Image (tube, grey):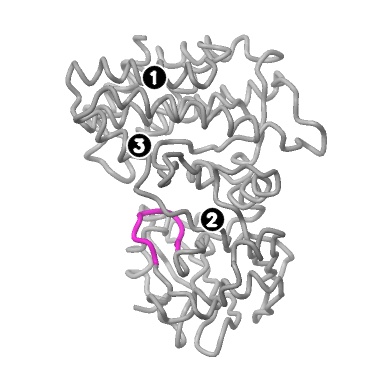
Amino acid sequence: MSHRDPAWLASQRWFRSKQRAIARIIEVDRAPLSRRAALVVIRVDYRDGGLDDRYLVPVVDGDREPVDDDGAWRALAALIVSGATVAGERGRFDATVSAAAPRLLGGSPLDSLAERRTRVEQSNTSVVLGERLMLKVYRLLEDGENPDVEVSAFLTAAGFADTPAVAGSLVYVDDRGVRSTAAMLQAFVPSRGDAWAAMLAAFAADRPSTTHIASDVGQLTDRLHTALASIPLDGEFPARSATGEEVSRWRASAEQQLALAVSAVTGAAHARLTRLASHVLARFAEGFRLAAGTTPVSRIHGDYHLGQLLARSDGGYSVIDFEGEPARPLAERRRPTSPLRDVAGMLRSFDYAARTAAGDAETAASLGEARAAFLDAYGGPADDALLAAFELEKACYEVRYEANNRPDWISLPLAAVARLVER
């Protein structure tokens, strides 16, 4: 199907506005990649009259989406490692190559590498090249620097070994001069699955393994946060505490997540969440009350859960996808905040795994042990009330996410809100 077809676009996993009716699709730019392939930028207008979206669509032979070994993905990777600029009809694509690129390429010519598009559901497109490189194409073109590229490149330069090294990236510059991250090329990490699959299996059949996995993840999280804390904030050394303004923003964000969750659900779920709302707000007030001046802030992962950890063959894990929660604005995802947000996200992921695996009393006890092992390996939260507030905020975010994407799962985060209020 053509990229101009609303039905085709609405069926794509990376298309974020499935709840909005498409009014029209306009091709606003096109830049050549090779004799057959091109990079197309489309603008999507909606019938509700709200803000439009821009998407990047690589095409072959005029308007067809590439398939494996069409050569389009290799051409895009070649553009990135060239460090060149390609002009479009209205804007341009600027490539940046990293110092790690020669090592990651290993002398292999890109045109000899087989293309294999991954089948994982996600908001971007990932293509494995020769089992050596991973090309990630950011379909939604958002104004500003994507934190996935920004943070991954910093960690690569800093020598952090537990995330795929970056070879280069691509930015789209429109006719207004506005820059949007379009793609990133990084090392491919062979894996035997992810930490989600490992924890799910452990909760289902091997209870002692849950604490071992949780402990490993806790140590990794501690190393990750130590590395992220070295990223300069506003051009200055990052070691500082949260300001009153930042904490007020955190509380406002948490309260907004609750409001959005309430508006996203209907029927019995809406009635239940409405009854819990005053108790949730009280927990937010308690958790954020004393955070200013004592809570350290830094850059964080932003969407930290078991599925973001690739299980390597050496027994370790590699952290991927530093984009942050896709429902939050890009500017918010780039702001420094408390690392306890990541801790809360991982604890919520443990809860999902435990209750997906079985949900019985024994699993609940195993979940408690896994939580304790993770927090002990991490070094323990400096502020239990703040962590509880972030965990409750994450559960509210999950209610909204499930209502919009997987309605059959809504009971899981809704029950978590009730438990977290009681705790």
Q: Residue furthest front?
A: 314
Q: Is residue 9 left or right of residue 326?
A: left
Above or below, 36 against 97 in this view is below
Labelled disc at residue 51: 2
The secondary structure that most of the magenta stretch takes on is loop
Name the image quarter holding the N terminus: bottom left
Q: Amino acid at mark 2?
A: Leu
* Foreground disc of the pair 1, 3: 1
Q: CA distance from mark 1 to mark 3?
A: 29 Å
Q: Residue at x 38, y 32 (%)?
A: 261
* Residue 246 percent across, percent down from the top left: 67, 25
Q: Residue at x 29, y 32 (%)?
A: 353
Q: Is residue 46 left or right of residue 252?
A: left
Near-viewer residue (287 or 372): 372
Which residue has dot 1 on it?
Answer: 371
Which residue has dot 3 on it?
Answer: 264
Residue 5 location, quadrant = bottom left
Labelled disc at residue 89: none
* Residue 121 percent across, percent down from the top left: 35, 54
- Discs 2, 3 touching: Cβ within 8 Å: no
Badge 2: residue crowd in 10 Å (few <14, some 14–19, many ≥20): few
Disc 1 element? helix
Q: Residue furthest right?
A: 236
Badge 3: residue crowd in 10 Å (few <14, some 14–19, many ≥20): some
Disc 2 element? loop
**Residue 39 in magenta?**
no
What range of the chain is rendered magenta? 117-126
Q: Amino acid at mark 1?
A: Arg
Q: Amino acid at mark 3?
A: Ala
Q: CA distance from mark 1 to mark 2?
A: 41 Å
